[in-house]
Structure formats: C-alpha cells, structure tokens
Amino acid sequence: MNTHIRDVVTGTGGYLPERLVTNAELATRLDTSDEWIVQRTGIKQRHIAADNETTSLLATHAAKKALEGAGKVADEIDLIIVATATPDYTFPSVATQVQFNLGMTKGVAFDISAVCSGFIFALATAEKFIRSGSHKNVLVIGAETFSRILDWNDRTTCVLFGDGAGAVVLEAKAGLGTTEDRGILTTHLRSDGRHREKLYVDGGVSSSQSVGYLRMEGREVFKHAVGMITDVITDAYNATGLSSTDIDWLVPHQANRRIISASAQKLHIPEEKVIFTVESHGNTSAASIPLALDVAVRDGRIRQNQLIMLEAMGGGFTWGSALLRW
Ligand code: UT7
C-alpha cells in the first residue's frame, strides 16, 4: 500500500503576558461596562504585553514550550512559520528573530500575514512544505501584540483584543492516506479583498509611514463571519467525507463567543465540544487557535487520535479551516 506523508502535531506551547486587564479596569477609563463586554463578546479579561515584550519574545516563549512538548531541540527544526500582523519591525521577519532567539543556525524562517486567520494559513503552508518532502520538522507559531495597534480611546475595538502567542511542532510521519491517519487531513483557505476596508489598520510603511490603529466595522464583520466559517468547515467535510458528528473538538478563532456559538449551532456541533478561551484571553488574532489548542491539550481534553476542527476568519477578509487527527 502507498504511504502518504502526514503532518502530525507532536507538541504545543502557549505564552500570555503577565499583565491582566479586566473589563472593570477598562470601564474606569472608557464609557463601557463589564456587563456590555461580557454580553456582546464573552470576554472578561485580556493579557497585555509589557513595553519590553515584543511579538518575537512572546513567540519564542511559546515555541520553546512547544519544542519541549514535542521532545525536540531547536536544531531539529527545519522550518519556522510565524503568523502575525504585529511584527517587531517592518523587517526582518519575526520568524528570523525567533530562529535567532532559539539559537538555530540552519533551516528557514518566514512570516505570513493573514491577521486572525494567520495560524490556519501558516498551518496550511507548513502542510504543503511537509507533504512535498522538502521539510520534516516545522514550528508553526501565531504571535501578536495587538495592544500596540489599538486606539485605546475607541471603545468599539480596544475592549476586544489581547496579546499572546501559541505554537505547535508539526512532524512528518507516514500515513495510509485515509481519514484514520494522524495529522492534517485537509485545509481550506479563502480570501476576498472586496472586504479589506471593513477591518484594517489605518497606517503602514508604504501608505502613511506610521503604524496606525485598528479600525473595524464590527457589525459588518459579524454579519459575514458565521457564513464564511461554516462554508470552509463544509469544504473540509466535502473533502473528507466526514461530518459534524465525527468531530471531537471544534477549536475556533476566539473573536466573539456569539460568533463561535452561532457557527457551532449552524453546524450542529454541541457547545460541549467547543474549546472557548475568549473569556480569559480576548481576541489574540493569529495566536488564538494555538493558544486554545495548548490549553485543551494541557488540561487533557484534546487527546491522541481525536478529530479536531480548526477555523478562523479575519481582516482581508481571510478565512480558513483545518481538519486534523491529533
Ligand atoms: O477577529 C476577527 C474579526 N473580529 C470580529 O470577528 C469581531 C466581529 N464583531 C463583533 O464581535 C461585534 O460586532 C462587536 C462585539 C464588535 C460589537 O457587538 P454588536 O452587538 O455588533 O454591537 P454594535 O456594534 O451594534 O453596537 C451596539 C451599541 C452601539 O450603540 P448604539 O449605536 O446602539 O447606541 C455602540 O456604540 O453598543 C455600543 N458600544 C459599546 N457600548 C459599551 C460599542 N462598543 C461598546 C463598548 N461598551 N465597548
């Protein structure tokens, strides 16, 4: 029988800055309330990076924990992909900074920009590198310091986001090419630039020579989110012949509890099978899925051979899904 190269997650890691900002604290400086934020988003608190904590530093902490979980040393890694919309510098990439921080002198490292969908885009890219046979051990990281691009006077956006990083180690393993194989079974990526102005940062190198602030038409994003998410999950079902009843855990991007619940309901996935971290992390953009994976692996919910569905939607718009057997 033919063997197929599969990409199996063998380690996860997460890192959240120490400083916690509660809704009550935000309500002391903004016209908002714990009640509004919890009711509309499910968020109760978020972690905010200290001034000296850059995205690459958060990413490095998460990467070290993922390596430890996989029982690997940094030099065994031949590819690092970092998904981020909040890099330390315009260039070089966060990924090369992480490569340096880990003491790696070989392999290749690069960043991917797909905002909140970034981790899924990075995972799908890693999958293609591994399947081609060119790379065997890959660190996929989502890391963000969104606190640096928030307008802290804009209550419609600043209450929603937090900082953090999550990472996974993906290893090439032999499979049979069936949905019983461990590893990534299918990935589906989409984007539609017609929506690029509904969620964007109003500055940048080539436009304003400044960093800018995040701007969002929240209601518009919300309106599209559930349909886009359910579409790419349906794509994953169509590609594999699997369905919601087969899913052990849905690990969604953590933007808003209401979006997650509405998507799960539309797909007939019971909430007991959904990993929620939005309450304690807020929306950490590309970091939210690997952080949620790490939480659920460490508390024993996610176990080997379970079927895990990942999904995200964000600025661009970009959206995507990844179905994997743990
Ligand atoms: O990561 C992927 C991208 N992001 C998302 O997926 C976010 C998608 N959008 C959302 O999650 C929701 O649209 C929000 C949480 C951003 C907003 O919830 P909403 O239920 O859509 O509220 P809304 O924007 O319709 O605003 C309702 C009211 C408005 O007041 P009026 O116009 O009805 O008087 C807002 O001004 O709530 C007001 N409001 C607030 N009130 C207290 C907006 N932000 C706040 C706030 N505190 N922080």
Image (cartoon, rainbow, N blue to C red):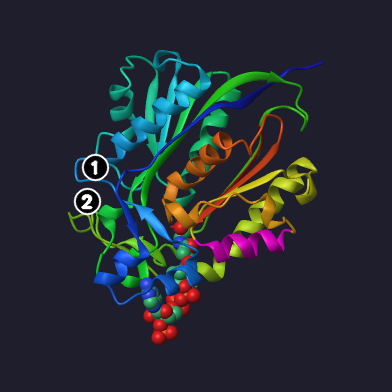
Q: Identify the element where label 2 is drawn.
A: loop
Q: Is residue 77 above or below residue 16?
A: above
Residue 324 rendering spot, x and y as whole percentages: 66, 36
User: What amino acid does circle 2 point to?
Assistant: Val
Residue 316 rendering spot, x and y as whole percentages: 44, 57
User: What amino acid does circle 1 point to?
Assistant: Thr
Q: Report whether residue 56 is seen.
A: yes
Q: Report whether residue 114 is seen.
A: no
The answer to whether residue 251 is magenta is no
Disc 1: CA contacts within 10 A as few (<14), some (14-19) or many (>=20): few
Disc 2: CA contacts within 10 A as few (<14), some (14-19) or many (>=20): few
The quarter of the picture where residue 105 lies is top left
Residue assigned mark 1: 90
Q: Quadrant of the C terminus?
A: top right
Q: For the residues marked 1 and 2, what is the alpha-carbon distance in whole angstroms?
A: 8 Å
Contact between marks 1 and 2 (CB within 8 A): the answer is yes
| Residue at horizontal 57 percent and vertical 40 percent from the top | 296
Residue 214 rendering spot, x and y as whole percentages: 32, 62
Residue assigned mark 2: 205
- 60 and 207: which is toward the camera: 60
Is most of the magenta stretch helix, strand or loop?
helix
| Residue at horizontal 48 percent and vertical 42 percent from the top | 291
Q: Left of 262 or right of it: where is 245?
A: right
Give the extent of the magenta segment. Answer: 256-267
Residue 83 rendering spot, x and y as whole percentages: 41, 40
Q: Identify the element where label 1 is drawn.
A: loop
Q: Quadrant of the N terminus?
A: top right
